[in-house]
Image (cartoon, coloured by chain):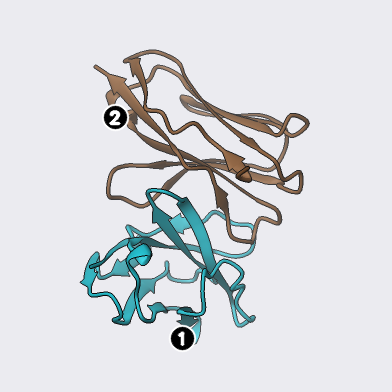
Chain colours: A cyan, B brown
């Protein structure tokens, strides 16, 4: 079956611009996660959605980062006023429910010039 | 000190060797432990998932958890060139929260 998909696969933007990254989780998965993977920091948790509950935003690095999940399915991660340190691979994962295996998408490689 | 420590390598071994990959952690609240494999420019792929101390085996892979020492290991038997990848340990407190990852070990299996 179809796995987690993310778009775009690559995004190059200029410092100060806003970007939107999209994640389509596996159908039927109620939990959705965003992570960031950078050379210096490794893989870091950003935000977690579970069903209709309020998201866990504890990993968001600044108020320039936000995410929403519409209709319990597709999610969009928005980075406002991008900075060069935002350059990283942004990974999305989904799981069937709480405490279940997280399946990762291929990621979006963001480069901020 | 990071919550999860993992040697980044690279670790280079000949084909057929037994590989040992390790992570240590400082947060005793971690209860769920995972190993992911990541090929270049791909997303991480789950290899092993465990929530108790002891060993868990799946084919050529064995995961070992020692909660008293805050130490987890992944063993790969009969290693193959296709096992060359970055191996990431990950853990969580409640199983449903965001995972805390090690930085990953870059493994190279020489043919």
Quadrant of the snapshot with the C terminus of chain B = top left
Q: Is residue B86 left or right of residue B33?
A: left
Residue B107: percent from the left, percent from the top? 37, 28
At x 62% / y 32%, what residue is drawn? B72
The vertical placement of A101 against A86, above or below, is above
Quadrant of the snapshot with the N terminus of chain B = top right
Residue A110: percent from the left, percent from the top? 29, 65
Which is more toward the observer, A65 or B97? A65
Which is more toward the observer, B7 or B1? B1
Residue where numbered disc 1 is placed: A70
Q: Is residue A18 left or right of residue A71?
A: left
Residue A3: percent from the left, percent from the top? 36, 61
Which chain is indicated by disc 2? B
- As drawn, which residue projects farthest toward the bottom? A71
Q: Quadrant of residue B3?
A: top right
Residue A103: percent from the left, percent from the top? 45, 56
At x 31% / y 42%, what residue is drawn? B39
Please tell me the numbered disc located at residue A3: none
Give the structural element (helix, strand or loop) at label 1.
Answer: helix
Please tell me the numbered disc located at residue B82: 2
Same chain shared by disc 2 and disc 1? no
- Cα separation, mark 2 vs mark 1, equals 39 Å
Q: Is residue B41 left or right of residue A49?
A: left
Which chain is indicated by disc 1? A
Which is more toward the observer, A84 or A88? A84
Give the structural element (helix, strand or loop) at label 2.
Answer: helix
């Amino acid at each position: 079956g179809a796995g987690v998909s993310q778009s775009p696969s690559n995004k190059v933007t200029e410092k100060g611009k806003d970007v939107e990254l999209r994640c389509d989780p596996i159908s039927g998965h109620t939990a959705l996660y965003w992570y960031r993977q950078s050379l210096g920091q490794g893989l870091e948790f950003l935000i977690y959605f579970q069903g209709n509950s309020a998201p866990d935003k504890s990993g968001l690095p600044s108020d320039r980062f936000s995410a929403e999940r519409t209709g319990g399915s597709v999610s969009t991660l928005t980075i406002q006023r991008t900075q060069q340190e935002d350059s990283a691979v942004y990974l999305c994962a989904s799981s069937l429910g709480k405490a279940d295996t997280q399946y990762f998408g291929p990621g979006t490689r963001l480069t901020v010039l | 000190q990071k919550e999860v420590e993992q040697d980044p390598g690279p670790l280079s071994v000949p084909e057929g060797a037994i590989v040992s990959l390790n992570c240590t952690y400082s947060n005793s609240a971690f209860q769920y432990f995972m190993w992911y494999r990541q090929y270049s420019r791909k997303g991480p792929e789950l290899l092993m998932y465990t929530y108790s101390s002891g060993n868990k085996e799946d084919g050529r892979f064995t995961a070992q958890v020692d909660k008293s020492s805050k130490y987890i290991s992944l063993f790969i038997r009969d290693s193959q060139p296709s096992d060359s990848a970055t191996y990431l340990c990950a853990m969580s407190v409640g199983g449903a929260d965001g995972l805390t990852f090690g930085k990953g070990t870059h493994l190279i299996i020489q043919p």
